[in-house]
Image: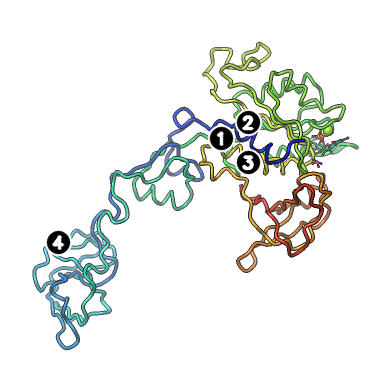
């Protein structure tokens, strides 16, 4: 069994990120939420676009007001009113002022704004009783951003603030990484779909739906391969088909030591290179990780058993190894394997910078005693809660059994009990893997 950290490094080292030229698409800003920028974005615009007022008040020449006071106020003639969106027509001459509203363009000749609270208006005159700071409340053109500079860098995830910046900068067409394609297979003779009646001995294939949801939330495109029966030939074809056009293949079940656990041998028959067969993790021990050569030169993808577009002179595949995760069937093991191993791989593949790959651990205080048998690095599931500014980890109620899907609901953290440790007492600090929000 490989140590968890070593398994993680083996996997990440074999992930070749999407190509910033080939694996991109140009999309409209309106559909860019949660996408990842593949190239830098610049704008021709300066921010602010022009000198403008930060306050409702009067635009003045500093030298007309710099020595005013209660006894000798400055009295200026108001020559123009400038609301936001209006282009000033007058140049401010000595002893003149313009009424100006927040966001409005500063008139030529003026260099300072006096807030209206510090003035008294009398018809077309304004009386100023205390000197403002020089250039007070003026937002100068280009002070926030100079046109032509890099606005956003590749690898940036486009969430609300980034979308705001792009809209303001009139960047409406964006080059983003395409979303990774993740094929999902559930293996097992015992499986039925959620809408089929259960016969004795059967269970519902929950993994397919769980992994599809997880892939979607993680920014990938799930490609559902359905249920594959525990039959070597059937499984071989299903895996060969799943690889077509996929960046990652996730199969669940059939990777342990049972008589019908065929995944590893089928992968070997398909010339996959198997890098990991089991990991010292609980749950999730029998994880298999393999790679197929880039589809351009993969024997399986160019073999006659597949009506692969590749061997009909179809559009060339990628020049990147296809990642295969043979995930344990136990439903908790399946998701823990995704959260702990597949997620960093998918995030690296997606074009994110290294500090975003994860896994993301936080320090928390154990709210309950956390127990394990100490033989494998154990991940106990439960809720990560922010209490008065620090994290607490609350163990899910019910049994920490990798077949117990029921108390996995609402999991937001996996508490790590290291190998060799059998107890982290309540009140002690514990490393918690953040999950639930991809
Ligand atoms: N003698 C041993 N037996 C087992 C070992 C071992 O080391 N020695 N490993 C155990 C561990 S740990 C795990 S994890 C499981 C994983 O086994 P498989 O990956 O081969 O999974 P299956 O046998 O196919 O199924 C296990 C379990 O999960 C249920 N399952 C399977 N697929 C789904 C699905 N799509 N949705 C919901 N539930 C699913 C299946 O019914 C089984 O109950 O092996 C242990 N055994
Ligand atoms: O690896 Mo396990 O412990 O049943 O998931
Ligand atoms: Mg099995």
Is 138 drawn above or below residue 311 in the view shown?
below
Ligand 3: image quarter: top right
Residue identified by numbered label 1: 349
Tag 3 residue: 343
- Please indicate whether residue 163 sits to the left or right of residue 420 in the image: left
Q: Residue at x 81, y 45 (%)?
A: 402
Q: From the Cβ of disc 3, is ligand 2 less than 8 Å away?
A: no
Mark 4 — residue? 108
Residue 269: % across, % down: 74, 18
Q: Is residue 77 above or below residue 340?
A: below
- Residue at image position (67%, 59%) is 364
Image location of residue 382, percent across then percent down:
73, 55
Identify the residue position indicated by label 2 in the image: 248
Give the camera-side residue of 424 and 303. 424
The mark nearer the N terminus, 2 or 4, is 4
Q: Quadrant of residue 14?
A: top right
Earlier-in-chain disc, 4 versus 3: 4
Q: Are marks 4 and 3 in contact (CB under 8 Å)?
A: no
């Amino acid at each position: 069994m490989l140590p968890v950290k070593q398994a993680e490094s083996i996997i990440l080292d074999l992930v070749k990120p999407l190509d910033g030229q080939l694996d991109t698409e140009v999309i409209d800003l309106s559909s860019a939420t949660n996408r990842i920028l593949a190239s830098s974005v610049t704008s021709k615009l300066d921010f602010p676009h022009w000198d403008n007022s930060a306050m409702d008040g009067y635009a003045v020449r500093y030298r007309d007001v710099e020595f005013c006071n209660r006894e000798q106020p400055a009295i200026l003639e108001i020559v123009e009113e400038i609301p936001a969106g209006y282009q000033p027509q007058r140049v401010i001459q000595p002893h003149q002022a313009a009424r100006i509203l927040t966001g409005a363009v500063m008139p030529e000749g003026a260099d300072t704004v006096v807030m209206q609270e510090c003035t008294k208006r009398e018809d077309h005159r304004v009386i100023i009783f205390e000197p403002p700071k020089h250039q007070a409340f003026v937002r100068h053109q280009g002070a926030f951003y100079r046109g032509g500079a890099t606005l956003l860098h590749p690898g940036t995830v486009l969430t609300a603030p980034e979308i705001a910046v792009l809209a303001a900068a009139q960047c409406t067409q964006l080059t983003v990484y395409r979303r990774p394609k993740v094929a999902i297979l559930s293996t097992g003779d015992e499986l039925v779909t959620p809408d089929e009646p259960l016969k004795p001995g059967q269970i519902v294939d929950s993994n397919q739906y769980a992994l599809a949801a997880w892939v979607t939330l993680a920014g990938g495109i799930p490609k559902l391969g359905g249920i594959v029966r525990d039959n070597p030939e059937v499984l071989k074809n299903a895996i060969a088909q799943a690889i077509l056009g996929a960046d990652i293949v996730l199969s669940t079940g059939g990777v342990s030591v049972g008589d019908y656990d065929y995944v590893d041998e089928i992968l070997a028959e398909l010339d996959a290179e198997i890098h990991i067969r089991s990991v010292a993790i609980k749950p999730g021990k029998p994880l298999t990780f393999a790679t197929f050569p880039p589809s351009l030169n993969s024997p399986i993808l160019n073999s006659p058993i597949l009506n692969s577009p590749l061997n009909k002179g179809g559009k060339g595949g990628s020049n990147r190894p296809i990642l295969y995760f043979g995930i344990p069937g136990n439903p908790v093991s399946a998701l823990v394997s995704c959260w702990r191993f597949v997620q960093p791989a998918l995030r690296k593949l997606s074009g994110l910078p290294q500090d975003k790959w994860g896994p993301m651990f936080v320090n928390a205080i154990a709210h309950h005693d956390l127990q394990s048998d100490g033989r494998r690095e154990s991940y106990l599931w439960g809720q990560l809660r922010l209490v008065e500014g620090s994290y607490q980890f609350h163990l899910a109620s019910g049994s920490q059994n990798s077949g117990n899907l029921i108390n996995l609901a609402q999991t937001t953290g996996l508490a790590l009990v290291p190998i060799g440790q059998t107890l982290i007492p309540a009140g002690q600090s514990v490393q918690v893997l953040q999950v639930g929000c991809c």
